[in-house]
Amino acid sequence: MVPLRALLLIAISLRAASLMAEPIRLPSIFANHMVLQQNQRIPVWGWCTPNAPVTIHLAAQTKSATADASGQWKVHLDPIPANANPQTFTVSSGEESISLRDVLVGEVWLCAGQSNMAMTVDGKTAWLHVGGIHDAKRVVETSADNLLRQFRVEWKTDTRPQSRGEGKWTIASPEATPDFSATGYFFAKTLREHLKVPVAIINASFGGSSVEGWTSREALTKHAEPEWASTMNRLIEEYENHDSLVAKHVEAIAEWESATRRNNPNGNENDARWLTLPATDAAWRPTTLPAPLSKLDCPNGGIVWLRREIDLPEEFGQAWRLDYPACKAFSTIYLNGTRIFEATSANHLANAASRPTFPKGTAKPGKNTLLIKLHGYTGNTGITAGKFSIVPFNPKLETVPLSGEWFASTEAAFPPLTPSAPKQPTFPTKGTLHWMPVPSQFNAMLHPIIPYAIRGATWYQGESNVGKPHYGKHVQIMINDWRNRWNQDAFPFHFCVLPGFGPRKPAPPKAHGPNAATNNSPHLPSPTPAPQTSLIPPRTAISTPSTSMMPVPASPMSLSPTPTESTSHGLAPSSPPHTSTAQK
């Protein structure tokens, strides 16, 4: 008979083991309705309990692996021929298993770029509504095809490579096709018609993104121009460390204010005096807004308090907000004695219009008291222009303008700035990551799906790089980076570029923009020669509106355009759209 103490220890051990167990997790691209690349080894990876065995089963294949100490695992399925019959894909570890249904095998293409590739069949994307393609209704209504699919990667950015992303598989149908990339859809449709196998596109596109956004930091640091790479790395570091830069800026502003006698001599602790100062006190003098500080007895800047009593209709209740203009001065707004807004050296709100709201119980029907403290460094700062009003949330009620009669009182008037005064520190603005020339889309959208097996890539991007140098070289870096990371040195890469617009010129200019890669005749070397297979007959028509595709071979080849391919913008011609592969 087993002693009770031993049974308790066994139970505790089993409980501890169950708590340590991690559920099986797969990248989001491994999901129901996925399409696997035919005739290639297929990488499969994911996460589970550290050091646990994992088994993958598909059709006649069974592969096994053991997770490492962090719980990561990876296996390769042997090449599989195209199969339009739905399969079940199973991953199991211990007593847990995941079964993915309706899995096909065929052609898989990555479709990447900016809004050109992101534009959907019906013209609606996460941020853009551009009207859709010509005859979209007919295309959508006749689009049902169980063997044509899209995996749409969610729009995300990050400064560091992510292991897990988000996305969803959908099947071409009147319900789902409107959300397909328009360019990707017609590309896949043409492949379906010629190859007679399942075809899928991976729609990894992001409006306004640059070529650098889709390239790894390592590749750009190693192969881009040293000065450019240094700037890129500085931008990333500044973005990631913005909070510490702001903290240093606040300290620098305080030192500058003290050196130029533009600090608050009484400190913010003195605010209580103004909050309790009766409206009848002689310190308040009538004034009219809008007006700069120079009109409020502070020709060189200063600290001024503004006060107004406002009677609001009963129906306003507490359901309203302020429209407050950019003052280029630090501001503190009090409503009935409660601080509801503050623009400081730490938040950079002084240069932007704001819409302050307030906690429940702050406002009331009838009489309300607004106090505004302005701290401006020059006389031309203050409430001078822009929307300045009370806005009810009920659209049936009218906005109450705040321009007009106010009371003002000066807390401090600053002296003139001397010629020898130090320069005012500049606020370290934080850029918009998805539009910065740094690998943000690569990190959050591509890295999580690499090395999902693909046949090749189609690229539709360029406008965000117009007028910027090194586009041709950076495209080469990106292509080679992708080929290396997918471990497919010879996968074909297609450019899809806008047709020419504007007057034609006999020869292309030296371009830095969308067609710089072709104008600069890049060579795209690969360690291995391209296989001699044809995926699409040369110059096969594609019904994408106003696009043409140019292949980038895995082996070196000049891509200089002919005179008929040039325009004043360095773009591709408006000749009949066509596509061909790198291997032909």
Image (tube, rainbow, N blue to C red):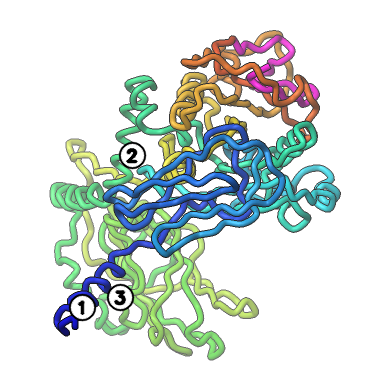
Q: Which residues are magenta?
A: 558-584
Q: Considering only vertical position in the picture, is 68 above or below 495?
A: below
Q: For mark 3, what is the residue?
A: 284
Q: Amino acid at mark 3?
A: Trp
The residue carrying pointer 1 sits among few (fewer than 14), some (14 to 19) or many (20 or more) residues within 10 Å by Cα, namely few
Nearer to the camera, 573 or 321: 573
The residue that disc 1 covers is 273
Q: Which residue is more in the foreground, 287 or 39?
A: 39
Q: Which residue is pictured at 71% across the width and 9% down the height?
A: 563
Cα separation, mark 2 vs mark 3, equals 49 Å
In the rendered structure, which amino acid carries the disc numbered 1?
Answer: Arg
Taking the spot 37% from the left edge, 56% from the top edge, the residue there is 48
Q: Secondary structure at mark 3?
A: loop
Q: Main secondary structure of the magenta part?
A: loop
Q: Please tell me which residue lies in front, 450 or 574.
A: 450
Q: Residue at x 73, y 16 (%)?
A: 504
Number of other residues with Cα within 10 Å of mark 3, as a class: few under 14, some 14 to 19, many 20 or more: some
Label whose residue precedes the other's in the sequence (2 or 1): 2
Is residue 124 in view from this perspective? no
Residue for badge 2? 236
Q: Earlier in the sequence, mark 3 or mark 1?
A: 1
* Residue mark closest to the camera, 3 vs 1: 1
The total number of labels drawn is 3
Kindly give the residue lying farthest to the front in the view shown.
Answer: 1
State the quadrant of the N terminus: bottom left
Q: Secondary structure at mark 2?
A: helix
Tag nearer the camera, 2 or 3: 2
Image quadrant holding the C terminus, namely top right
Q: Is residue 389 left or right of residue 67?
A: right
